[in-house]
Amino acid sequence: MSAALAAVDVVVVGAGQGGLATAHHLLRAGLEPGRGFVVVDAADGPGGAWRHRWPSLTMDRVNGVHDLPGLSMREALGPVDPRAPAHEVVPAYFAAYEEVLGRPVRRPEQVRQVRPAGPRLLVVTDRARYAARAVVSATGTWTRPFRPFYPGVGTFRGRQLHTADYRGPGEFPGQHVVVVGGGISAVQHLAELCRVATTTWVTRREPVFRAPDAAGALDVRARRAAVAEVAGRVAAGLPPGSVVSATGLVLTPEVAALRAAGVLERRPVFSRVLPHGVRWADGSEVAADAILWATGFRPALDHLRPLRLREPGGGVLVDGTRAVREPRLHLVGYGPSASTVGASRAAREAVRVVVAGR
């Protein structure tokens, strides 16, 4: 027997940065958890993607954690040890935030599909069915790791893993690891692995290193240019790509030291994977025990497939946060808002439009 149909004004899918920020703004707008809105999350605990980060990633090395609206991390947890694991600290912060919101998250509850149902959208989960006036999808990307295909990739006899599978350098002592990818995750992996293993760094494009601003971060103009680049792709109906990859790499003291030590000497992408390593077009080879694909993630949108949102170019057109092909749907954390600060801003905009349409 199918679950009873529950009428609700807004369903928020996902309880990461974007989903929790959306819940905050819905509460501020006067909607109450339950009949006003529900937040459903597939995980069995708070933290979103942060609960799956590798244990050796500490708070002083994360690529930015933006405070959720209304409650900063310091207010929630007090002073945070910069050497504390991010996969413990951020979920603790999210858990405290959910308490302040009044525990609006229903979990574990996996959304199977969202589809039209007359004047409303039907949200079908593994536990319930909701008829919603509006849906905010804030599912992020962590569950959709991207692994590119290269000839021979299936013949490799060593270990292949993605950033989503990486648990730290302790699994690779004395090995040679080929790290593929030009983003901050690849650099963080290389910084750890070079202490216990030898490495080869491979990227599709020549890495761009940018000088930090006075605070040690990427300057505002570069960040805005990166967001504009991703927004342009979304406006053209193309897959958004990554805001982080578009910004380049900040030349922090740690990154500068890695360059000086030769760890960040980059090679172009190989032409073929061999059983024992990789080969380039010029015939040169490197033997490897492992290939670590730090090649990013794709938006987790499978639950939206019945809505037929994809453009011929493969992306989803959005106007602000609203899906052009289905105006009752808002995407938070998609394209230019796929960052911690971007997702929070997009959540505020999505709720503004949803409430205005009541």
Image (tube, helix red, strand yellow):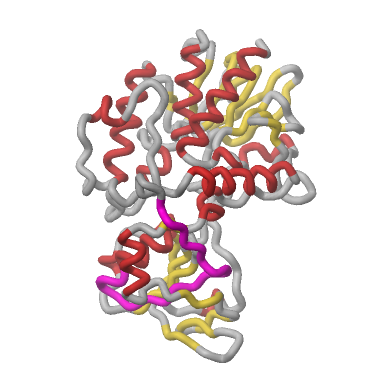
Count the labels in the image: 0
Q: Position of residue 323 (x, y in %)?
A: 70, 32
Give the quadrant of the N terminus.
top right
| Residue 163 falls left or right of residue 317 | left
Residue 34 horizontal/vertical position (percent): 49, 13
Outermost residue toward the top in this view? 30
Residue 39 or 189: which is nearer the viewer? 189
Q: Is residue 207 magenta?
A: yes
Q: In this view, does 182 lie above or below 218?
A: below
Residue at the image point whose x is 49% and y is 64% from the top: 182
Q: Is residue 167 above or below residue 34?
A: below
Q: From which residue to which does the magenta span run?
A: 193-212
Locate residue 102 relative to residue 293 in the image: left or right. Answer: left
Query: With respect to residue 131, does 161 lie above or below?
Result: below
Horizontal side of residue 47 vs 26, given as left or right: left
Q: Which residue is drawn at 23% across and 45% down?
A: 82
Quick check: 275 left or right of 350?
A: left
* Residue found at x 40% / y 48%: 213
Instruction: Point out residue 352 in the picture as x, y percentages from the top left corner.
Output: 59, 18
In the rendered image, which quarter contains the C terminus?
Answer: top right
- Residue nearest the observer in this picture, 202 or 148: 202
